[in-house]
Amino acid sequence: MYRSTVLAAAITLVLAGCSGSGTQAPPAPSKEAQAPVTPAATANPLLVASTLPFQAPPFDTLKDTDYQPAIEEGMKQHLAEVRAIADNGEPATFANTIEALERSGTLLTRASTVFSALTSANTNETLQKTEEVLAPKMAAHADEIYLDPKLFARVKAVYDARDTAGLDAEQKTLAEEYHRRFVRAGALLGDADKATLREINKEESSLSTSFASKLLAATNAAAVTVDDRARLDGYDEAGVVAAAEAAKGRKLDSKWVIPLQNTTQQPALASLKDRGLREELLRASMTRAEHGDANDTQATIQRQAELRAQRAKLLGFPNYAAYSLSDQMTKTPEAAIKLLTDTVPAATAKARGEAAKMQQLIDAQKGGFKLAAWDWDLYAEQVRKAEFDLDESQVRPYFELDRVLNDGVFFAANKLYGLTFKERKDIPVYHPDVRVFDVFDADGKQLALFYADYFKRDSKRGGAWMGNFVEQNGLTGTIPVVYNVCNYTKPAPGQPALLSFDEVTTTFHEFGHALHGMFSATKYPSLAGTNVARDFVEFPSQFNEHWANDPVVFANYARHHQTGEAMPAELVEKIRKTRTFNQGYATTEYLAAALLDQAWHSLPADAGKQDVQAFEADALKRYGVDLPEVPPRYRSSYFAHIWGGGYSAGYYAYFWSEVLDHDAFQWFRENGGMTRENGQVFRDKILSRGNTVELATLYRAFRGKDPSVEPLLEHRGLK
């Protein structure tokens, strides 16, 4: 996924003019827009443009206490710039209004971009407290801009004249984008409703920040501690060592700790033989934020759902989902729900068939119990081994992280786009695990700077994402400084980081987002890179996953970490044959989460507070995805995508984008597969265009037709 943090969402609202839509990092600072800086101010590195290559953040000199004063000063400067635009006595033009807004907010962009990245990837108590202070201030700052009638009058004047003012296509699109954002933010409301909206926005921003902090603490606290090594029977040696290291990090001598990942299911469940420990681990995961303590998120999300419904009503929509999806490719929640529910019968039928096979295996082994959710992964692995003679322990030795990155992800980018990469050690980073790479285009010219941060730690929220420290900006000539963050288990010192094939795919996925940011070639940063609709932004990333399976790419990176030998052909064939294995489960758990998201955000403003667990159970039953053996990928209380990020009413976007990505990959198949020529077409027509063209039109210009769902259903084995 792309970066979607709490403060980042507030930053997006504030800096929509100069940082784009979605929740991506704002653009690089404009040198000509720098405010005067006093000698005393230079003690804070954020108050001046970075002198590092490509304006990379100076992490070696930044202190936790630098962010709040820099962001507050940034808001002050930004508001002064915006008020000057609103008070301009000259008639509104694209140059003195829209482009002027694009150039505003330099300091706020620089400081808030770095801060929001760290609060996701390497937070601490100081940063969390700072985030709590800043979130409502940023929300109020956004309202001060979007609810300013004088400023909106100028934006509307440019919008109304967009067809007669001699604007080029990108300028016209940007004028339309600005008008849309102002209207969606409440610019057309009366004064009383604007005042109500300000209060809603302030409270909701604080609640989102609170949710993220509570969830991180709850997830860390819910890690399962094991006192007896024998209970880890079945866990591979690397997992045992990692659990010992995790315990050591928490000062628990002679114990083992299994930390939780962000999803419901946990990797250890696929191998632990102790059924009691499996149940303990899954229950810890599913109830992590439901203990009635300081980290319980249920009251927080109850109020968030209420506030979002109230905001939607103020803005003229029946519910928040209708408001949220009105500017997406999907357009309506009905269309999103139909896409999901149309798939439910095939997915749940396949899942029930998978469960039946596992129950047969349990009965054959005289297990004496009915398959439960905590049994699924273990017995799925046994079924996979029985049917395909394949288990996870056979393939992990061939997926060493460094080789996957260099000989897989980077290799594919070279074959498709001509990119080359060179690691550099002179750029300061925010954590020792972070690596930095120069990215060179096919002509040898520097294209971007890429940061890679792959290992899990307690200071990092769960999941995987991409963001920008510096965004491509045609007004200033800055190039992208892009990062990927994941949560892979860090190996013991001196040991290799071995990945599952799912983690290999995640590495390709997040780099697909990175390519979307790197290849951006727009003039205006609001329309650059990944600043597109949520249900399109996952398309380039999911498309890039296909190259993990490409025979040429796979053969290049799937090599044994000790011998360097390529994966044997028979093992490769076994992996290929298991492509649709367990897809009933995978699809059903995803659909359950996506439909749960739609249910929460389809509540009307008069619905009142909902009992979280009762509401969830009812929604899953209503949509036919209440299989007890297949819990949602995220339950309501730890669904960070929708409560602490930018995917509220938008988690369906992964499925919508998957329709696009499989259809696009079908185009590659029809046109010769992985070639530089095909890569260039995809770069020119999709990856470089940002949000400069209406997205359905953009896709049709690439594909020659609207996307078909058939390739997706075939891929998932649901036809």
Image: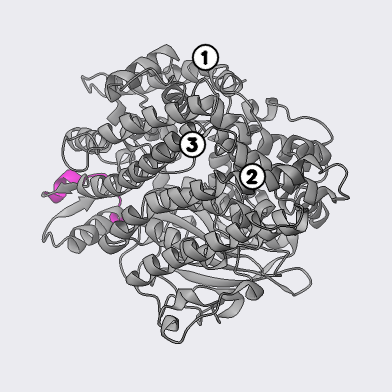
* Residue for badge 3: 194
Q: Is residue 88 toward the left or the right of residue 205 in the image?
A: right
Residue type pointed to by label 1: Pro
Q: Is residue 360 toward the left or the right of residue 429 in the image?
A: left
* Residue for badge 1: 345
Nearer the observer, disc 3 or disc 1? Answer: 3
Q: Is residue 146 toward the left or the right of residue 298 in the image?
A: right
Residue type pointed to by label 3: Lys
Could you say whether the residue bearing mark 1 is in a helix, strand or loop?
helix
Quadrant in the picture for residue 99:
bottom right
Vertical placement of residue 71 versus 505, above or below? below
Residue 152 is labelled as 2
Vertical placement of residue 423 versus 176, above or below? below
- Label 2 neighbourhood size at 10 Å, few (<14), some (14-19), many (20+)? many
Quadrant in the picture for residue 29:
bottom right
Residue type pointed to by label 2: Phe
Q: Mark yes or no: residue 548 visible.
A: yes
Earlier-in-chain disc, 2 versus 3 = 2
* In-front residue for pair 152/700: 152
Q: Mark yes or no: residue 464 visible.
A: no
Write the start and end of the magenta stretch as one range. Answer: 228-238
Could you say whether the residue bearing mark 2 is in a helix, strand or loop?
helix
The residue located at (71%, 40%) in the rendering is 665
